[in-house]
Image: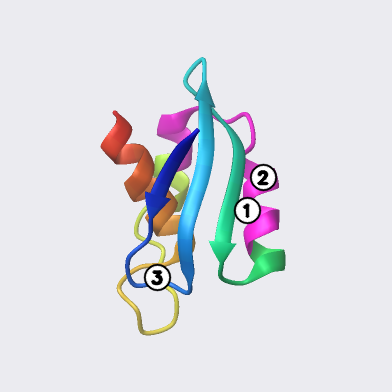
Amino acid sequence: MYTYKTKGTCSREINFDIQDNKIKNVSFIGGCNGNLKGISNLIEGMEIEDVIKKLSDIKCGSRDTSCPDQLASALKELI
C-alpha cells in the first residue's frame, strides 16, 4: 500500500496499491467523497502511465492542482 500526502487540495491523503503496473484499491481521505469514489472506480485496473496521462494537470476551481492531479503526481513519483 502506498500513501501520498496531498498538497493544495481538500483531500489530505491518497492510498493505493500497484500490482503488475496497474493501479488498485485507490482511496482518498477527505475531499468530495462521491466524486473521488467515482474516479477511484474508473481508474481501477488501469496502467499507471494511462492514469497519469488522463489525470495530470486537472485543476480544481482557481487552484493549481486537484485531487486527480495529486494522484497523478503520486504515481509520477513511483516511476
Taking the spot 46% from the left edge, 34% from the top edge, the residue there is 50
**How far is mark 2 from mark 1, CA to CA?**
5 Å
Disc 2 to disc 1: CB gap under 8 Å: yes
The secondary structure type at the circle numbered 3 is: loop
Q: Does the magenta stretch include residue 48?
A: yes
10 Å neighbourhood of mark 3: few (<14), some, or many (≥20)?
some
Answer above or below: position of 62 versus 18: below
At label 2, which amino acid type do we have? Leu
Residue matched to label 1: 39
Name the disc covering residue 2, or none: none
Residue matched to label 2: 42
* Magenta-highlighted residues: 36-51
Q: Earlier in the sequence, mark 3 or mark 2?
A: 2
At label 1, which amino acid type do we have? Ile
10 Å neighbourhood of mark 2: few (<14), some, or many (≥20)?
few
Query: In the drawing, does residue 78 fall left or right of residue 21?
Result: left
Q: Where is residue 59 in the image (x, y as percent from the top left)?
A: 40, 70
Taking the spot 46% from the left edge, 57% from the top edge, the residue there is 13
At label 3, which amino acid type do we have? Lys
Magenta segment, prevailing SS (helix, strand or loop): helix
**How far is mark 3 from mark 1, CA to CA?**
15 Å
10 Å neighbourhood of mark 1: few (<14), some, or many (≥20)?
some
Taking the spot 67% from the left edge, 45% from the top edge, the residue there is 42
Q: Position of residue 30 (x, y in %)?
A: 56, 68
